[in-house]
Image (cartoon, rainbow, N blue to C red):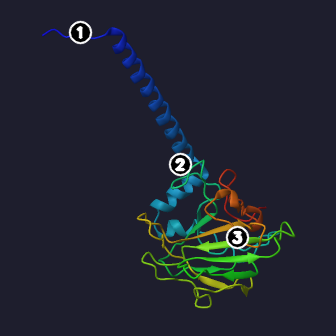
Amino acid sequence: MELHFAPMFTRRRLIVILILLALFLLAAGYLALTFLRQVRGPAGRRFFTWWQGNEATRAALVTVQREACPGAPFILPADGFIGLLYADPRGPYSASSPHQGIDIFSNSEPGVTPVYAAADGYVTREPSWVSSLIQRLPDDPLQPGRQIWLYYTHMASRDGESFIAAAFPPGTSELFVEQGTLLGYTGDYNGNSPRTVWTHLHFSIVRDDGSGHYTNELEFANTLDPSPYLGMEVHYERAGELSCKQ
């Protein structure tokens, strides 16, 4: 039996296949270039060193800032390696949905590295929160008249043992604390996600909704760059040495 193929149909199919292949190669090339830029940049090199390093190597990457940097209103809320930065597009984040705060990784096991209040303010712990606290600052020190919120999370073990200080049980509402007050300890809790995380504190500055309530921290647009509040450059696009600005 002799088969006959329509030449036009074959050519069209070949053109479609070539176009799809070209689009795939362009996308793969873009992703590869983006990955290389992220890995080769200062933040990427530091992160790789932390990931591969021993305890001594990691210790050299730890930032300790128990006093506020000159001219800045906040202290760094935990000692550690500031590994994921504000507006960071690296996984599990992306350019369209970047990191909403900073992740401070601990050179310790869960439940060991203290977390301190970055500023004076009123602490709330919602009844269902295992690893999180939020702190209301009625007057933004950099923009007086605006209310902001400070969000601290991952303060629990992987299986949900809370490392939040006993002074803040579930249901705590509007408890005033001074800057430097112990809030708890860093952990590796990640909710119901199957993805494991290193021991760290996620810290972010959250906008008020205009009615006296905090907005959804998961939305990048609802957060503020912590850099001017900490006096150190922690924005992904501008970060250099993670220490007080000179």
In this rendering, the answer to whether 128 lies above or below 86 is: below
Residue at x 37% of width, y 19% of height? 13
Q: Residue 43: percent from the left, percent from the top?
A: 59, 54
Q: Which one is nearer the viewer's eye here, 240 or 145? A: 145
Q: Is residue 118 visible?
A: no
Q: From the image, tell me which residue sits under label 1.
A: 4
Q: Is residue 232 left or right of residue 104?
A: right
User: How many numbered dots are placed on residues in this image?
Assistant: 3
Distance between the alpha carbons at the discs numbered 3 and 2:
34 Å
In this rendering, the answer to whether 218 lies above or below 124 is: above
Q: From the image, tell me which residue sits under label 3.
A: 214
Q: Is residue 192 left or right of residue 182?
A: left
Q: Secondary structure at mark 3?
A: loop
Q: Looking at the rendering, in which quadrant would you find the N terminus?
A: top left
Say what amino acid the circle numbered 3 marks. Answer: Tyr
Q: Residue 174: percent from the left, percent from the top?
A: 71, 84
Q: Say whether disc 3 or disc 1 marks the residue closer to the N-terminus.
A: 1
Q: From the image, tell me which residue sits under label 2.
A: 39
Distance between the alpha carbons at the discs numbered 1 and 2:
53 Å
Say what amino acid the circle numbered 1 marks. Answer: His
In this rendering, the answer to whether 63 lies above or below 40 is: below
Q: Secondary structure at mark 2?
A: helix
In this rendering, the answer to whether 143 lies above or below 175 is: above
